[in-house]
Image (cartoon, grey):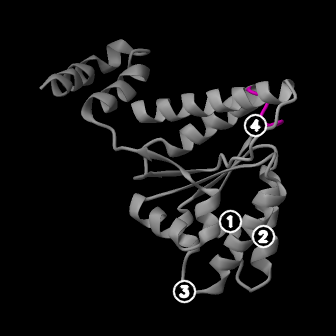
């Protein structure tokens, strides 16, 4: 999780600097903040996305700071032409907040529907470039193929955060925090986990 904390700190410092430049009347370079989260399921990608939405709201970068979660099913319709409308609806819900697209790689397929969703997404990202933050997520290799499938995706998403699988110590900490609230009931399992974490 150290790399994730480092990336969050970098993002916070950058946003603070941008706001300071704006307050002093200086030019603000147009830099894409959209991100790619790579990693296996259960590694905390959605949790970090929620945290980022709150951070960006507190920093004044986003006026609402809410999180809209979606995937291929939430963006792709059964007929050509309807997908653009469905994708637009999801994006508009996320304006002034964060749009989190899980398993985004599934938009790249043999049919035209996924491409229609990608084209619509890219257009709306440009339209709302000052008040929309997009995170796409999925398995590392599949996300690389997703970004490489369209040059415009590569230009919009140039920041990556890799989410590693939890090690034994991290899993113990995840379990132990709530377990401490009911120590009597969970003392034997905790001791067992402590044995595992130190072996």
Cβ–Cβ under 8 Å for marks 3 and 2: no
Kindly report which numbered mark, 4 or 2, lies closer to the viewer in this rendering: 4
Residue at figure coordinates x 55%, y 75% from the top left? 108
Q: Earlier in the sequence, mark 4 or mark 2?
A: 4
Calculate the distance from the C-alpha at mark 1 to the C-alpha at mark 3: 18 Å
Cβ–Cβ under 8 Å for marks 4 and 3: no
Cβ–Cβ under 8 Å for marks 4 and 1: no
* Horizontal and vertical percent position of residue 96: 81, 44
* Horizontal and vertical percent position of residue 198: 16, 22
Q: Earlier in the sequence, mark 4 or mark 1?
A: 4
Query: What residue is disc 1 on?
Result: 74
Q: Earlier in the sequence, mark 3 or mark 2?
A: 2
- The answer to which image quadrant residue 178 occupies is top left
- Under circle 2, the secondary element is helix
- Residue 114 left/right relative to 24: left
From the image, give the main secondary structure of the stretch colored magenta. Answer: loop
- Residue 98 left/right relative to 43: right
Query: What residue is disc 2 on?
Result: 86
**Mark 2 Cα within 10 Å, few/some/many (few <14, many 20+)?**
some
- Residue 110: image tag: 3
The quadrant in which the C terminus is found is: top left
* Horizontal and vertical percent position of residue 167: 28, 36
Calculate the distance from the C-alpha at mark 3 to the C-alpha at mark 2: 19 Å
**Mark 4 Cα within 10 Å, few/some/many (few <14, many 20+)?**
many
* Horizontal and vertical percent position of residue 36: 54, 52
């Amino acid at each position: 999780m150290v790399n994730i904390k480092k990336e969050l700190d970098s993002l916070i410092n950058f946003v603070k600097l941008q706001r300071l430049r704006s307050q002093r009347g200086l030019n603000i370079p147009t830099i894409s903040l959209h991100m790619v989260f790579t990693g296996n399921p259960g590694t905390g990608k959605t949790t970090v996305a929620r945290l980022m939405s709150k951070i960006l709201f507190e920093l004044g970068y986003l006026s609402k700071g809410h999180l809209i979660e979606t995937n291929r099913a939430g963006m792709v319709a059964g007929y050509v032409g309807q997908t653009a409308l469905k994708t637009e609806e999801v994006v508009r819900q996320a304006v002034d907040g964060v749009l989190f697209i899980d398993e985004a790689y599934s938009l790249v397929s043999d049919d035209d529907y996924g491409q229609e969703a990608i084209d619509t997404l890219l257009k709306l990202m440009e339209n709302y470039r000052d008040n929309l933050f997009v995170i796409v997520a999925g398995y590392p290799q599949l996300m690389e193929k997703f970004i490489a499938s369209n040059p415009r995706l590569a230009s919009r998403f140039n920041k990556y955060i890799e989410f590693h699988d939890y090690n034994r110590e991290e899993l113990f900490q995840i379990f132990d925090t709530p377990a401490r609230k009911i120590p009597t009931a969970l003392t034997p399992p905790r001791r067992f986990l402590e044995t595992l974490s130190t072996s």
